Image: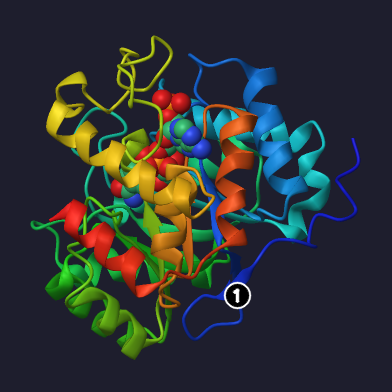
Amino acid sequence: MEANEKRYDDMLYRRCGQSGILLPAISLGLWHNFGSVDVFDHFEKIARTAFDNGITHFDLANNYGPEYGSAEENFGRILKKGLGKYRDELIISSKAGYDMWPGPYGNWGSRKYLTASLDQSLRRMGLDYVDIFYSHRPDPCTPIEETMGALADIVRRGKALYVGISNYNDEETKAALAVLKEYKVHCLIHQPKYSMLERWVEPKLLPLLKDEGVGLIAFSPLAQGLLTDRYLNGIPGNSRAARSTGFLQKNQVTEEVISKMRRLNDVAAARGQSLAGMALAWLLKDERVTSVLAGASSVEQLLDNLKALRNLSFAEEELSAIEAILS
Ligand SMILES: NC(=O)c1ccc[n+]([C@@H]2O[C@H](COP(=O)([O-])OP(=O)(O)OC[C@H]3O[C@@H](n4cnc5c(N)ncnc54)[C@H](OP(=O)(O)O)[C@@H]3O)[C@@H](O)[C@H]2O)c1
């Protein structure tokens, strides 16, 4: 299947920190909806539609599924069935840092774990290299020199072109960047959780990354679906909160949260956007945010999210209305 010839016409690309890489403002995450519990034809269509609309970046991790590893296996099948023909137009990332296999070497941040895990990820996806490999979370018990040294060696061996860190707080980020500098490997990107409902990155991390020339890609920018119209009228049976394999718990869908979402939805409607579109645009209004890493369980959701790019600017009154609702 050939990709859409006009795939680059409408996407916005942003430079990822001080690097040669441009990322699409909206990237696709495969944490949910691409596992062995999901339907291949359905999610293949989501991935192909993403690429047909200029989404060049697909984000994975060793344990995405469920089952662990199955999102990478499935993405490997999608590549094999045709998307792989465009390998040089794709930025594929993977990570290791959370529990993956039993015993002491299948978790956290040792050189042993990161190196073996990336080899497994490459086999599952049928790739020679990933574009970005992340330390998925800081490990308080492993020296940062070991974790960052493993990342640096992975780049030297050509198994990843760039490295990133995820879930590192301000101080952990400073320490990781300092060590990577000693190894003369640039940290391309930081992947923190960032949305209207989760704003810890704003005071220190965003300015730090800007100063250090590191890009930022926001994960769960829709707060796993809370910042969409999904739950405005109850919990749909096929939603993440309803599915037993979903990470969003029903008890997070509270009346207090949903009443805020209804008010935000009114602000979005007045802007001519869906709530999801406005939530993504609100992050992207800050040019230090390289990309937002959204998930989607349908092609319709993906296409709705892409519409965010049509209006990324906010009037002062809109911003203060949003702040008043969130506060
Ligand atoms: N580094 C890390 O530790 C970490 C952690 C978490 C995630 N991530 C990355 O971030 C990616 C995104 O995370 P996420 O899936 O939590 O992202 P999200 O974008 O916050 O939530 C995605 C969910 O929101 C709903 N949704 C999306 N677009 C919608 C729309 N237009 N209208 C209505 N509902 C919509 C869907 O829920 P339904 O399924 O209910 O339809 C979808 O599954 C992951 O795939 C992964 O790549 C990284």
The residue that mark 1 highlights is 21
310 or 202: nearer the eye?
Answer: 310
Give the x, y percent position of residue 96: 35, 47
- Callout 1 environment at 10 Å: few (<14), some (14 to 19), or many (20+)? some
On the picture, is 88 further left or further right than 33? right
Residue drawn at (55%, 54%) of the image? 308
The image shows residue 97 at horizontal and vertical percentages of 28, 48
Quarter that holds the N terminus = top right
Relative image position of residue 84 (x, y in whole percent): 77, 44
Above or below 21: residue 124? above
- Image: 222 above or below 141: above
Residue 31 visible in the displayed image = no
Determine the residue located farthest toward the left in the rendered image.
141
Horizontal side, residue 145 vs residue 318: left or right: left
* Left or right of 198, for residue 41: right
Q: Quadrant of residue 189?
A: bottom left
Q: Position of residue 160 (x, y in %)?
A: 54, 62
**Nearer-the-camera pick, 186 or 156:** 186
Q: Within the displayed image, which quadrant is ligand 1 positioned in?
A: top left
